[in-house]
Image (cartoon, rainbow, N blue to C red):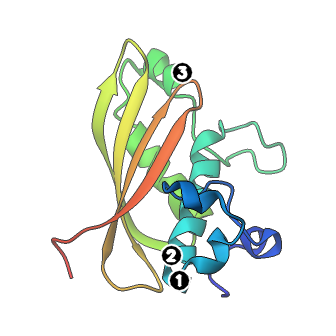
Amino acid sequence: MESISLYDLLVGSFISRGDDPADTDPSYFDRLSEDQKLRQSIVENLKMVLQTRQGSAQHLPDFGIPDIKQIYFDEGTIDSVPNKVCETILKYEPRLTNVKVKRKNFDKSSMNLALEIYAEIKQLPGKEVLLTEFSSTGWTKVVFQRDEGTK
């Protein structure tokens, strides 16, 4: 399939697997439909982007997201983070369009931030919802859900 990343095609698997214990089987990749492979490939790429601190990839200095803790200390708020995440997603995940990022929750004590990312996959009709959580320590979770409210 031309829509999944070259890395995923070359390796023939994804870094993370599904939730079912049977998904650790090497044939997991082959059992997925093309739409599932596309969604999983996007999730894997977004995890990479969201887990990378901006400035840590010398050849792409704007790859990744800024340090949440630094933004909070510099600005006294994290209100600019959703816009910065949206800009980064639009630049580094070209398979998505109509990306909107909303702050869901922010815990100052742990510097954990939860975002909802609404987007459309260019090749698939309908809105998708990406539920995303990450912290200043680099922990990231990205999960796709279909937005049943739109068809």
State yes or no: discs 3 and 2 in contact (Cβ < 8 Å).
Answer: no
Q: Position of residue 14 (x, y in %)?
A: 67, 62
Displayed quadrant of residue 120? bottom left
Q: Earlier in the sequence, mark 3 or mark 1?
A: 1
**Which amino acid does the dot numbered 2 rest on?**
Gln
Q: CA distance from mark 1 to mark 2?
A: 5 Å
Q: Is residue 148 left or right of residue 23?
A: left
Per the rendering, the mark at residue 70 is 3
Please say if 97 is above or below 25. below
Q: CA distance from mark 3 to mark 1?
A: 41 Å
Can residue 45 be seen by looking at this rendering?
A: no
Quarter of the figure with the N terminus: bottom right
Q: Is residue 140 left or right of residue 7?
A: left
Q: Which residue is mark 2?
A: 36
State yes or no: discs 1 and 2 in contact (Cβ < 8 Å).
Answer: yes
Q: Position of residue 124 (x, y in %)?
A: 42, 85
Q: Is residue 143 left or right of residue 90?
A: left
State yes or no: discs 3 and 1 in contact (Cβ < 8 Å).
Answer: no
Q: Position of residue 57 (x, y in %)?
A: 78, 43
Q: Which residue is mark 1?
A: 33
